[in-house]
Amino acid sequence: MNRMIEEKNIDIEQLDWVPIPPELKDGLSEQPMSKRKLKSWMLVLQARQIPCRSETGDRNYQLLVPVDQYQNACQELIQYEAENHNWPPPPPAERKLQENTASTIWIFIFLAIFYNITQQQINQFGHHPINWVELGHAHAEKILNGECWRLITALTLHSGPLHLTGNILLGGIFMLRLCRILGSGMAWFLVLTAGALGNLLNAWIQSPDHRSIGASTAVFGAVGLLAAINTLHFRQNLWRRWPIPIAAAFGLLALLGASGENTDLGAHLFGFLSGTGLGFVSEYLTRGLKHPWRLINGGLAFLSALLVVAAWWLALR
């Protein structure tokens, strides 16, 4: 058996070999063969059981086939190139990232300051003292009965320093990236909206006496936003693997959002789903937008702050 294989190899080596031009056209080659093309073409021919070999000289590569296989090899390679024309697709245009680190950090500082305010005994607005958690937590029955400000106020409350620190650290990772992509105004407006929608859906699905507080609903809204934005931005390159960013975000939700004794899985899940939906919608709506981003972001930043202030005004009045 080994002797037969050796004789076959000798017969192949004794054949006349001719190079295949990089342009797959007869005549003198006008451009050198790249190493990448050489490897891919050799794999194609080997898959079709067409003998081939490579030669290297003067930093040029050549793909050679037996004379009697030349036409067949060219046809296979022409078909391969036609089927893989413009593949892989070029990478998407790089996003123009905006420097918003300082403003993002300041918002988390304000969140920490507000937490310290809620720990003080403050006698104002007819309350002696103000029970911030009672006035602002996401109480399912009260939300569905019209106290819609709780959808937002609950996002600003925390049960303790550990709860607050966890949300700031985890939220900071995603918000810094999201703010650089979208700008602070749009990023925080979408995250605030995702958090409010998450609380609304959670109130609708939970029992009437369900209560929750914390910014984690909005944090997972930011995770969903980033997953949707990356899915759309890299959809050409991901091709059949386009769900990868969404799947990775679901994995993060399962890892960080479903553990702990007092974890509100429903709020995390609905915050994530709301963020994902808003991410898809915002990407399509803002595509080709001609208005100045700076003006839009400034307006949305003001609107986000106004919504939080208005929500607490309604809760305290």
Image (spheres, grey):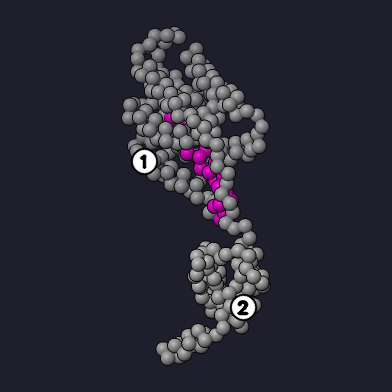
Towards the viewer: 36 or 156: 36
Where residue 174 sits: x, y (%)?
45, 36
SS at badge 1: loop
Q: Of the residues shown, which amino acid type is indicated by label 1?
A: Ser
Magenta highlight range: 215-240
Q: Identify the residue at image location x=50%, y=73%.
A: 55
- Asked if the residue under mark 1 is in contact with the one under mark 2, i.e. CB atoms within 8 Å, the reply is no
Q: Identify the residue at image location x=61%, y=75%.
A: 73
Provide the residue designation for mark 1: 259
Q: Could you tell me if residue 203 is visible in this image?
A: no
Residue 259 falls in which quadrant of the image?
top left
Query: How many other residues sit within 10 Å of disc 1, few (<14), some (14-19) or many (≥20)?
Result: few
Disc 2 vs disc 1: which is toward the camera? 2
Towards the viewer: 47 or 311: 47
Find out whether residue 238 is within the magenta segment.
yes
Q: Could you tell me if residue 30 is visible in this image?
A: yes
Provide the residue designation for mark 2: 70
